[in-house]
Image (tube, grey):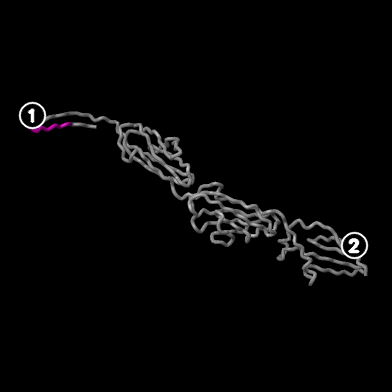
Amino acid sequence: MAISTVKVKIDGVWHVLTYNATSGKYEKTIIAPNRTSFNVNAGHYYPVEVEATNAAGTKTTVNDLTPTIGASLKLRVLEKIKPTIAISSPGANAYVINSRQPIVFQLRDEADGSGINISTLVLKIDGGTAIGNGSNGMLCNKVTNGYDCTYTPPIALEDGPHTVTINVKDNDGNAATQISRTYTVDTVPPVLNVTNPSDGFITNNANMVVQGSTNDVTSSPVTVTIKLNGTDQGVVTVDGSGNFSKSLTLSEGSNTIVITSKDAAGRETTVTITGTLDTSAPDIKNVSITPNPVDAGATMVISVEVSG
């Protein structure tokens, strides 16, 4: 009996095939669905149904569940858009004071995409051991179109620069563009040495120069601020060797000088110096010598009365 029609149904749409005398088969070139098949069913394929009708009107239908032939009626469609990776913390070239600074990042696939294959996640610090979902310190929460992840190093990192790289693929095998982020760990505050004045100073000169040196091995340059009696004294220049000096004008009486050194990570070292400006002059009120005159070689008492 002659075949009258052969058609196939894919993603709910029927397509009528045309007989090819050369191949002896019914064929048609059609456009695949524009969505990945990953989310269609548990098998991640589009089921294809074929219906053949003969001239007498008798129909035969096969589909993905038909024994023997069913395996060839499972259409897998792959999307070709790469997933994306974004790091929100730490910032690029940031200085952090936490040696176990959490790395916060987002993994996203496009809407209606195959979705992030979280088992392909690979995070490395300084090119070291691969860290994936389920690794100690890694926490990934599923959100719309992807995951929000945080990795907290279980072991403290050494002070200095570190580079993080992250890779992931979607469920259709598209690899995201690797992302990297460099930041610096600095857990040690800067060194601060004040060479002048000394704590507890007493002077009769209102003009004073504060001098010293500062340094931070990990996150130079270091900035210095100086406050006199609670008032900021303006810009303090620190040279390439870490030396600084600043001229101050003291107030009569007690003075408090606070010198603060701050590194790029925000860590601070502070030295507080207190001292006194006393510009008063002593007043000699009375002098007495007893006895006066005095015999040669004899003792005498000199008494001086001074105020101020």
Whether residue 124 sits left or right of residue 45 in the image: it is: left
Quarter of the view holding residue 190: top left
Quarter of the view holding residue 71: bottom right
Q: Residue at x 91, y 67 (%)?
A: 3
Q: Quadrant of the C terminus?
A: top left
The kind of residue tagged 1 is Val
Q: Looking at the image, which residue sits at the far bottom? A: 67
Q: Residue at x 58, y 56 (%)?
A: 123
Q: For the magenta stretch, what is the residue range?
A: 298-304
Q: Which residue is mark 2?
A: 22
Q: Which residue is mark 1?
A: 294
Q: Residues within 10 Å of mark 2 (few under 14, many from 20)?
A: few
Q: Quadrant of the N terminus?
A: bottom right
SS assignment at label 2? loop
SS assignment at label 1? loop
Viewer can see residue 19: no
Q: Residues within 10 Å of mark 1 (few under 14, many from 20)?
A: few
Give the image location of residue 65, x and y in percent: 77, 70
Q: Residue at x 22, y 32 (%)?
A: 307
**Mark 2 against mark 1, which lies toward the viewer?**
2
Residue 61 higher or lower than 112, as above or below = below
Asked whether disc 2 touches disc 1, contact meaning CB atoms under 8 Å apart, the reply is no
The kind of residue tagged 2 is Thr
Give the image location of residue 232, x and y in percent: 42, 37
Q: Residue at x 37, y 34 (%)?
A: 209
